[in-house]
């Protein structure tokens, strides 16, 4: 499995989500690279299924991925807001 670790050195605040029904998934980041660059594997997910509108047919993994995306984005905004207020 290729983890893309070498291509994301020095990056932060990325959630890679890989729908395993997506033919492109094999080229995705399959392992967490750091605490803020993480990989989600969605066995029932297809290409961008976690970015589509909610649907009653969504698998639990897709629903959970959306929750993880929201949690991380909120955390990153809080961290940015806290840092930018301290710097001004």
Image (cartoon, helix red, strand yellow):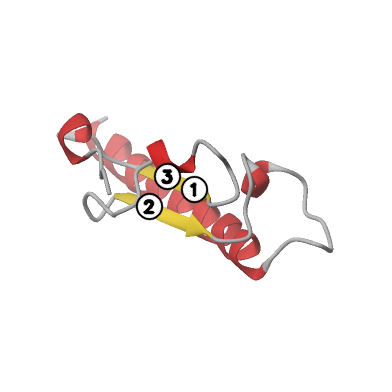
Q: Distance between the residues labelled 3 and 2?
A: 5 Å
Relative image position of residue 20 (x, y in whole percent): 53, 52
Residue ID at (25%, 45%): 3
Q: Where is residue 9 in the image (x, y as percent from the top left)?
A: 15, 34
| 55 relative position to 33: left or right | right
Q: Residues within 10 Å of mark 1 (few under 14, many from 20)?
A: many
Q: Name the residue under label 3.
A: 16
Q: Find out whether the residues at labels 1 and 3 contact each other: C-beta distance under 8 Å.
A: yes
Tell me whether the residue at label 3 lies in contact with that at label 2, contact meaning CB atoms closer than 8 angstroms: yes
Give the x, y percent position of residue 29: 34, 44
Answer above or below: position of 21 versus 60.
above
Say what secondary structure mark 3 lies in: strand
- Viewer-nearest of labels 1 and 2? 1
As drawn, 77 above or below 9: below
**Residue that numbered label 2 is attached to:** 39
Q: Position of residue 85 (x, y in %)?
A: 32, 38
The residue mark sitting in front, 1 or 3, is 1
Residue 18 tag number: 1
CB within 8 Å, label 1 to label 2 = yes
Q: Which residue is drawn at 33% across and 47% down?
A: 79
Q: Is mark 2 on a helix, strand or loop?
A: strand
- The span from disc 1 to disc 2 (Cα, nearest Å) is 7 Å
């Amino acid at each position: 499995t290729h983890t893309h670790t070498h291509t994301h050195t020095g990056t932060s605040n990325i959630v890679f989500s890989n729908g395993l029904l997506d033919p492109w998934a094999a080229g995705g980041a399959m392992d967490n690279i750091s605490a803020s660059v993480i990989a989600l594997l969605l066995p029932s997910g297809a290409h961008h299924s976690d970015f589509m509108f909610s649907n009653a047919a969504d698998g639990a993994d897709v629903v959970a991925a959306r929750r993880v995306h929201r949690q991380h984005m909120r955390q990153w905004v809080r961290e940015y807001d806290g840092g930018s207020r301290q710097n001004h």
